[in-house]
């Protein structure tokens, strides 16, 4: 299992990793916490030119560890491309993965950062906060398994149990198949949604109903789409015929 943490500096990723690893270890799971800071801090000084080496070798370490152990990635994983690289490692090795998004209000981050000596200037955190690529906002694959507010009490035991539960589920390939079929259903409903809007438009033009009746027709269409979402194996043409019949009968 690959646990991908993401969150801004000072949100509490290292604290969280350590505590979660301790609980998982107590529950009998061999787990290692890895992050790019391990390599970064092994250089006596920081240079931009080291960053590519650090990135590549952190991924290399993670992939090798994942073959044997659970891995918690203690990194900011600021861009969704970083999370995607990690997910690809999990998939390649047929392991489950879970993104855990740690969050806290900006003020809390700044206060914690000052308290630990402001190694990163507060202005940098403010800029990062503004631009942070929140997990799941753009892509479904990037959706967090859990979002943890680090200003509240964290139930590590509950989190560990949920991760163990997830690790027992079928591998990512099966999950991908399920996700693909969900997105297929979604695009079918979209198509029916568009088509029924057109039908309603033409119907209204033809019949010229009063305002009150128009409202009822609009509601009828909405209800039809809503009910469709609970159905399996939706057929576009059958659904359109059914909607036209409904409109003629109840419209
Ligand atoms: N849940 C929490 N409640 C209160 N303080 C916390 C919490 N988690 C972490 N802290 C404090 O916030 C500071 C930053 O924590 P930590 O090093 O775990 O953050 P981080 O997200 O790993 O930061 P970075 O990305 O810069 O390494 C530390 O001083 C830590 O004691």
Image (cartoon, helix red, strand yellow):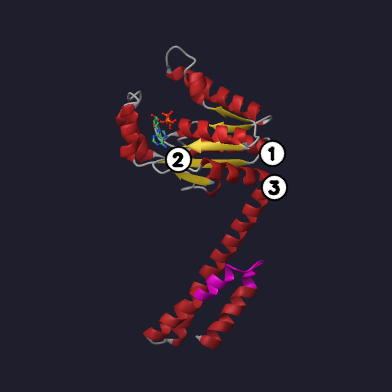
Q: Does the residue labelled 2 lie within 8 Å of ligand 1?
A: yes
- How crowded pointer 3 is (Cα within 10 Å; few <14, some 14-19, many 20+) is rated as few
Q: Eyeballing the image, is 227 above or below 61?
A: below
In the image, taking residue 242 as reference, residue 202 lies left or right, namely left
Q: Does the residue labelled 1 lie within 8 Å of ligand 1?
A: no
Circle 3: element type: loop
In the image, taking residue 62 as reference, residue 174 lies left or right, namely right
Whether residue 234 appears in magenta in the rendering, the answer is yes
The percent position of residue 234, horizontal first and vertical second, equals 64, 68
Q: Name the residue under label 1.
A: 94
Q: Name the residue under label 3.
A: 170
Circle 1: element type: loop
Cα–Cα gap, marks 2 and 1: 25 Å
Q: Which residue is drawn at 43% across and 17% down?
A: 47
Q: Mark 2 points at which residue?
A: 102
Whether residue 103 appears in magenta in the rendering, the answer is no
Q: Which one is earlier in the sequence, the residue at label 3 or at label 2?
A: 2
Q: Which one is earlier in the sequence, the residue at label 3 or at label 1?
A: 1
Cα–Cα gap, marks 3 and 1: 10 Å
């Amino acid at each position: 299992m690959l646990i991908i943490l993401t969150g801004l500096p000072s949100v509490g990723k290292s604290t969280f990793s350590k505590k979660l690893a301790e609980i998982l270890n107590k529950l009998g799971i061999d787990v290692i916490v890895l992050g790019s800071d391990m390599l970064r801090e092994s250089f006596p000084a920081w240079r931009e030119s080291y960053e590519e080496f650090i990135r590549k070798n952190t991924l290399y370490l993670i992939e090798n560890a994942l073959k044997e152990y659970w891995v918690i990635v203690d990194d900011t994983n600021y861009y969704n491309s970083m999370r995607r690289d990690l997910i690809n490692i999990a998939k390649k090795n047929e392991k489950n993965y879970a993104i855990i998004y740690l969050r806290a209000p900006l003020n809390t981050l700044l206060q914690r950062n000052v308290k630990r000596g402001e190694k990163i200037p507060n202005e940098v955190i403010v800029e990062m906060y503004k631009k942070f690529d929140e997990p799941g906002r753009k892509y479904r694959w990037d959706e967090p398994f859990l979002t943890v507010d680090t200003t509240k009490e964290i139930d590590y035991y509950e989190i560990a149990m949920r991760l163990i539960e997830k690790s027992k589920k079928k591998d990512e390939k099966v999950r991908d198949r399920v996700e693909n079929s969900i997105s297929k259903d979604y695009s079918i409903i979209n198509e029916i949604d568009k088509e029924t809007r057109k039908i309603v438009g033409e119907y209204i033009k033809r019949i010229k109903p009063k305002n009150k009746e128009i409202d009822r027709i609009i509601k009828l269409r909405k209800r039809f789409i809503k009910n469709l979402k609970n159905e399996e194996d939706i057929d576009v043409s059958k659904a359109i015929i059914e909607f036209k019949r409904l409109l003629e009968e109840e419209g």
